[in-house]
Amino acid sequence: MSEPPGAAVSLAEAPPPAATPSGPLTAQRVLPLRRPGRWIATAAVLVLTAQFVHGLVTNPFYQWDRFGYWFLRPTIVDGLLVTLEVTAYSAVLGLLGGVLLALARLSRSPVLRAVSWVYVWAFRSIPLIVVLLFLYNFSALYRTLSLGVPFGPAFLTFDESELATDLVIAVVGISLHESAYAAEVVRGGILSVDQGQHEAAAALGLPKGYQFRRIVFPQALRSIVPNYVNQLIGLIKGTSLVFYVSLLDLFGAAQSMGSTYPGDIVPLLMVATVWYLVLTSVVSVVQFYVERYYARGATRSLPPTPLQRLRASAIELRARARREAAV
């Protein structure tokens, strides 16, 4: 008896699938798309990397025995400590100055906006070495510094040559230069905060200072941190210029020892290079965890740590190996 048109047919009554010309249907494995270009590029990179490492290790010109001798010498370690000291002071003072300049750029006072703009324009235009050399010879222009009534009598007078030590000149010069760049980083971070956050805080009747400290600035830090850490890495390398104001930092110590031992110039330069790599790597690790901390509430899940990524990769490789063995 035939079914009327449009009648439903149950699965039990459905006809079996037709067999293919080569036989009945069988489960087939889906093969991934072949990418020969990726394998060729990977092989080329591995070969070039192996050649570079081989040349770096076997080339006698690098004198790795002398590198090991100089790496932890007291002179190099003392220069490293000077680099860390200058970097720490300059990073803190530069960030504080950048915050003040950014707030001045965003204020309603035309005088504050103009002065901060001129400051940022000037110190971003003048090379850091010029600023350091100018401060190093500052005593030729102003032998004494005084505090008192503007255009009137002075209450306290200081001898500039006694205050301006080599460390002070280096910190002040780098901080002045760094604050100009930090100001733009901070200003960009503040402007990245949604305007609705400002309006909501104002609607709650919160004071301006509280709005900035607890609502605006914490959200702006998500944008400020990666950019300012990039500036901090440049600051670590920029401290090598303090050698020209008679302060023996890491680069200055290596340069001084290279002048005393001309045959060890290359090992000493490699020592300075490796120490700079170590310092910037530590800053990059700190940057990752600081960004991860301020990502709370902005993303659905926090970015995995390097250890978590390694563990996930190991689990994925193990699962892939089991699938390969099962097939």
Image (cartoon, rainbow, N blue to C red):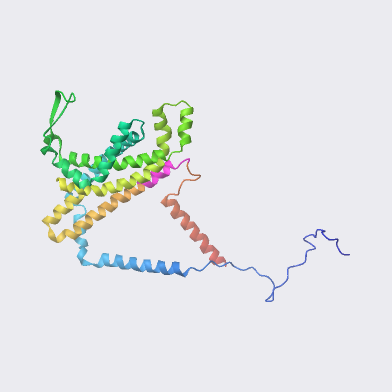
Residue at 31% over, 41% down: 182
Verify whether residue 51 appears in magenta: no
Quadrant into which the C terminus falls: bottom right
Where on the picture, by quarter, is residue 294?
top left
x and y, in percent, of residue 151 in the image: 16, 25
Residue at 22% over, 61% down: 64
x and y, in percent, of residue 246 in the image: 14, 46
x and y, in percent, of residue 195 in the image: 46, 36
* Start-end of magenta stretch: 286-297
- Residue 226 in view of the camera: yes
Residue at 42% over, 35% down: 216
Quadrant into which the N terminus falls: bottom right
Verify whether residue 288 appears in magenta: yes
Residue 148, compared with residue 129, is above or below; it is above
Residue 104 vs residue 264: left or right? right
Residue 151 vs residue 201: left or right? left
Q: Which of 238 and 116 lies nearest the eye of the viewer?
A: 116
Where on the picture, by quarter, is residue 122?
top left
How many numbered marks does the figure carry? Answer: 0
x and y, in percent, of residue 279 in the image: 28, 49
Residue lying at the far bottom of the rendered structure: 22
Residue 282, compared with residue 21, is above or below; it is above
Residue 108, compared with residue 315, is above or below; it is above
